[in-house]
Image: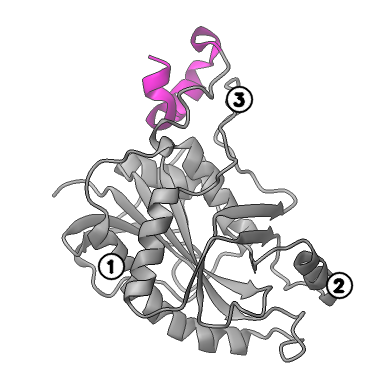
């Protein structure tokens, strides 16, 4: 079997891909600890893919507890070049209704203490991140969502909060005044690390609720979110399958060369252990 070149990270409600065949689970040890769980390698619409349940089997891992580095590193080791992510979000705009899909093109960070870089320990790099998702992959994802009948919104800003609590009313109103579009707890770190690993990344933000700013949704509850999650998961599976089917050919976007001008540290000065740990990511630049 060939290695998977497409990765799928399933968020709340999306714990499996029903169409996935020829399945094989693969546990990967990384220098950063364990990923959320084993990667499920299989075939989807004729393509080899790697699926990872972001929050683990049975949804056991809080957003702040996620080992983002291990999750993305594992994808890199497997040979993944593109990652399609799906996650539940709250809407901060009236026009983004529950069960809609937003494909954001920007992020805003409100997290406090998450590790979101592979670098350090004697190796410094600064990747460009003005455009934090892959435009090519995002277009494919949005087209796929539209083709399965979803209401799709192209572009917008995903504000990433720490959680696990939902926002206060004051916070929700503030984020709206800033022009934010959707709110979630997981995707920004994935996008940063994917860029450092030269992996294309795009997000399907699945709207479950209006957050607490909306007069009819002033108390966001898990029950409300779970009900919409189940419907969203069905749409997400169809969308991802369609997108995977369309992802053929080699990449022409800038994501594939994100580190080409990003590494500052001179190769001979990088500690050998750091070189070994990051070989799948930086090996071609430090030969």
Q: Point out the stretch of residues depicted in magenta.
A: 266-287
The residue carrying mark 3 is 121
> Which quadrant holds residue 62?
bottom right
92 or 45, which lies in front?
Answer: 92
The residue carrying mark 2 is 170
On residue 167, the disc is none
- Taking the magenta stretch, the answer to whether it contains residue 243 is no
- Of callouts 2 and 1, which one flags the residue occurring earlier in the amino acid sequence? 2
- Is the residue marked by circle 1 packed among few (<14), some (14-19), or many (20+) residues within 10 Å? many
26 or 95, which lies in front?
Answer: 95
Kindly report which numbered mark, 3 or 2, lies closer to the viewer in this rendering.
2
- Is the residue marked by circle 3 packed among few (<14), some (14-19), or many (20+) residues within 10 Å? few
Residue at the left extreme? 1
Disc 3/disc 2 C-alpha distance (Å): 39 Å
**Rendering coords of residue 177 (x, y %):** 80, 66
Q: Is residue 201 left or right of residue 131?
A: left
SS state under label 1: helix
- Of callouts 3 and 2, which one flags the residue occurring earlier in the amino acid sequence? 3
* Residue drawn at the location 56% of the way across and 83% of the way down: 98
């Amino acid at each position: 079997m060939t290695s998977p070149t497409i990765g799928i990270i399933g968020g709340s409600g999306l714990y499996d891909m029903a169409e996935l065949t020829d399945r094989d689970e693969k546990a990967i040890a990384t220098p950063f600890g364990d990923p959320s769980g084993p990667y499920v390698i299989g075939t989807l619409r004729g393509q080899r893919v790697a699926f990872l349940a972001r929050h683990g089997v049975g949804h056991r891992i809080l957003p702040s507890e996620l080992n983002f580095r291990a999750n993305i590193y594992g994808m890199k080791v497997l040979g993944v070049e593109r990652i399609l992510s799906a996650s539940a979000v709250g809407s901060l705009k009236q026009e983004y209704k529950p069960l809609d899909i937003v494909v954001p093109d920007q992020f805003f960070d409100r997290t406090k203490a998450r590790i979101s870089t592979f670098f350090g320990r004697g190796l410094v790099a600064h990747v460009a991140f003005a455009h934090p998702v892959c435009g090519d992959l995002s277009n494919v994802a949005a087209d796929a969502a539209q083709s399965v009948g979803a209401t799709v919104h192209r572009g917008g800003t995903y504000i990433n909060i720490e959680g696990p609590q939902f926002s206060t009313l004051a916070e929700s109103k503030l984020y709206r005044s800033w022009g934010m579009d959707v709110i979630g707890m997981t995707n920004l770190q994935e996008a940063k690390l994917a860029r450092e690993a030269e992996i294309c990344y795009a997000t399907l933000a699945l709207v479950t609720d209006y957050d607490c700013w909306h007069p009819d949704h002033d108390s966001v509850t898990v029950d409300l979110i779970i009900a919409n999650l189940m419907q969203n998961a069905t749409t997400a599976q169809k969308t991802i399958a369609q997108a995977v089917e369309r992802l053929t050919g080699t990449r022409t976007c800038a994501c594939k060369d994100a580190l080409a001008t990003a590494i500052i540290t001179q190769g001979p000065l990088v500690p050998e252990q750091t070189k070994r740990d990051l070989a799948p990511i930086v090996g071609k630049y430090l030969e």
